[in-house]
Image (tube, grey):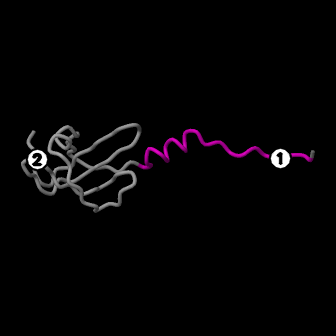
Amino acid sequence: MALEPDQLREHVLLETRAVYRVIAVGDELVQVEVIEAPGLPAGHRLNLTRQAVSEMRLLTAYKPWTTSGTARSEQRFHTDPPRITGQR
């Protein structure tokens, strides 16, 4: 499918997810707006290569992840600290 403004594109790698809205499509670069991406604020604009954006999955609907990849990892491996029940 051709790249068009207002498309939502998703990139998932190593349990992290980035979702971008296509703003403008050029011959070599595509301007996108961050919807959700680790370490980037929503609304931040980037210029990515046309190839990179073309390889991202086209979304027909957007549903935020409940936690980021980092938070999921922390949640998955989180254990409560040991409880000290007596004196030494």
Q: Amino acid at mark 1?
A: Ile
Q: Residue at x 68, y 45 (%)?
A: 80
Q: Point out residue 49 in the picture as x, y percentages from the top left corner.
A: 17, 46
Quick one: 59 or 87, which is closer to the camera? 87
Q: Name which of mark 1 and mark 2 comes first in the sequence.
A: 2
**Label 1 CA crowd tier, 10 Å (few <14, some 14–19, many 20+):** few
Q: Residue furthest right?
A: 88
User: What residue is shown with label 1?
Assistant: 84
> Which residue in the structure is indicated by mark 2?
28
Judged from the image, the secondary structure of the residue bearing numbered disc 1 is loop
Q: Residue at x 28, y 62 (%)?
A: 43
Specify the farthest residue to the bottom: 43
Q: Could you tell me residue 3's position as x and y percent?
A: 11, 46
**The C terminus lies in which quarter of the figure?**
top right
Q: Is residue 11 left or right of residue 86?
A: left
Q: Residue at x 35, y 44 (%)?
A: 17
Quadrant in the rendering for residue 24 = bottom left
Magenta residues span 66-87
Was residue 74 drawn as part of the magenta stretch in this picture?
Answer: yes
Q: Is residue 47 positioned above or below 58 on the image?
A: below
Q: Position of residue 67 (x, y in %)?
A: 45, 49
User: Mark 1, mark 2: which one is toward the viewer?
Assistant: 2
